């Protein structure tokens, strides 16, 4: 699980004039964003501002209407999801109910035909990474929400992806669990050096986790900057109002 060469851990990711239209609605309107290898960037903004659609285009679940997505400088928009080397975690844990924690985590390795002994070693490492060694043989229904989300996280990183996408992964958890998982996510990001794109509408969470925050409004990025810069020098009225509103 640990990258052998940290320089190879996270990929750079670039969105160039990325657009998505559903019917008559322009949901993502020319988004530009450059993410450095290993950077943790959060897409923050109100509901309906196009964050998930942007993430889905990076993942390959949605085809862009226009623009480009580049990982390490190479276009990936035409690659199917499984060839993008991207791990994903969603709000609903989306674990396979008929598989144990270990089997769930092993799934991406089976898909990639990783030989069994290596797969078993990687699953053990991934379980250790999220502190679930003792729960390997439990089925999802016998795990708490927080534990299920740890399994989902382990499954997302077990194949050493170079980019990790997370869409409101802590949205279904209570405050205490959410804070515990935030600490885990930060540690895992540090240990693996993977590039992370994280979606949330919760500014506290964005501030706690991110190297940089891209503030979305109505399908556009209003400003992409560190938390400090956003607070000290909001580029637009929207950014100032959105951050000022301690919802
Ligand atoms: P956010 O993640 O910021 O809440 P989304 O990207 O989920 O925003 O959605 C942005 C807008 O796009 C919303 O108005 C939503 O209804 C619309 N939308 C998202 N997915 C689809 C789809 N598959 N078909 C039609 N409209 C969609």
Image (tube, rainbow, N blue to C red):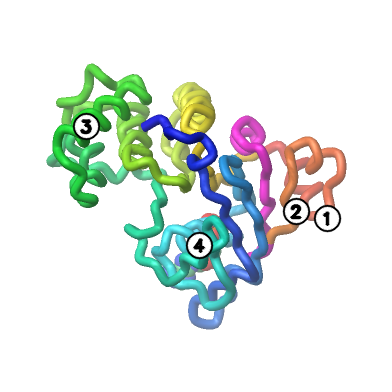
Mark 2 → mark 3, Cα distance in angstroms: 39 Å
Q: Residue at x 45, y 24 (%)?
A: 177
Mark 1 → mark 2, Cα distance in angstroms: 8 Å
> Residue 133, image x and y in percent?
26, 19
Q: Residue at x 44, y 40 (%)?
A: 169
Q: Which mark is residue 223?
A: 2
- Residue 175 appears in the figure: no
> Residue 182, image x and y in percent?
51, 28
Please say if the residues under marks 1 and 2 sit with CB atoms less than 8 Å apart: yes
For the record, the magenta segment spans 204-220
Mark 4 → mark 1, Cα distance in angstroms: 23 Å
Mark sitting earlier along the chain (3/4):
4
Q: Residue at x 60, y 33 (%)?
A: 209
Number of other residues with Cα within 10 Å of mark 1, as a class: few under 14, some 14 to 19, many 20 or more: few
Residue at mark 4: C-beta within 8 A of ligand 1: yes
Please say if the residues under marks 4 and 1 sit with CB atoms less than 8 Å apart: no
Residue at mark 2: C-beta within 8 A of ligand 1: no
Residue at the far front in the pictured view: 5
Report the residue marked by disc 4: 53
Q: Which mark is residue 236?
A: 1
Q: Quadrant of the N terminus?
A: top left
Mark sitting earlier along the chain (2/3):
3
Residue at mark 1: C-beta within 8 A of ligand 1: no
Mark 2 → mark 4, Cα distance in angstroms: 18 Å
Of the two numbered discs 1 and 2 in the rendering, the one whose residue sits closer to the viewer: 2
Number of other residues with Cα within 10 Å of mark 3, as a class: few under 14, some 14 to 19, many 20 or more: many
Using residue 232 as the reference point, say whether residue 243 is left or right of it: left
């Amino acid at each position: 699980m640990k990258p052998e060469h940290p320089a190879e851990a996270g990929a750079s990711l670039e969105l160039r004039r990325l657009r998505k239209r559903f019917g008559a609605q322009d949901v993502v309107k020319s988004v530009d964003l450059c993410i450095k290898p290993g950077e943790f960037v959060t897409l923050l903004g109100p509901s309906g501002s196009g964050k998930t659609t942007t993430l889905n285009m990076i993942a390959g679940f949605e085809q862009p209407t226009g623009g480009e997505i580049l990982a390490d400088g190479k276009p990936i928009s035409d690659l199917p999801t499984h060839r993008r080397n991207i791990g994903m975690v969603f709000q609903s844990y989306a674990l396979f109910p008929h598989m144990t924690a270990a089997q769930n985590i092993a799934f991406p390795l089976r898909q990639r035909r990783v030989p069994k002994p290596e797969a078993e070693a990687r699953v053990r490492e991934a379980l250790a990474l999220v502190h679930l060694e003792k729960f390997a043989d439990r089925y999802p229904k016998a795990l708490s929400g927080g534990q299920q989300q740890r399994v989902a996280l382990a499954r997302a990183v077990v194949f050493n992806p170079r980019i990790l996408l997370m869409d409101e992964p802590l949205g279904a958890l209570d405050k205490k669990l959410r804070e515990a998982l935030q600490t885990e996510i930060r540690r895992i990001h540090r240990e693996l050096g993977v590039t992370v794109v994280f979606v949330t509408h919760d500014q506290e969470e964005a501030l706690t986790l991110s190297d940089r925050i891209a503030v979305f409004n109505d399908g556009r990025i209003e400003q992409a900057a560190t938390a400090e810069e956003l607070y000290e020098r909001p580029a637009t009225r929207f950014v100032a109002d959105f951050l000022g509103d301690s919802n």
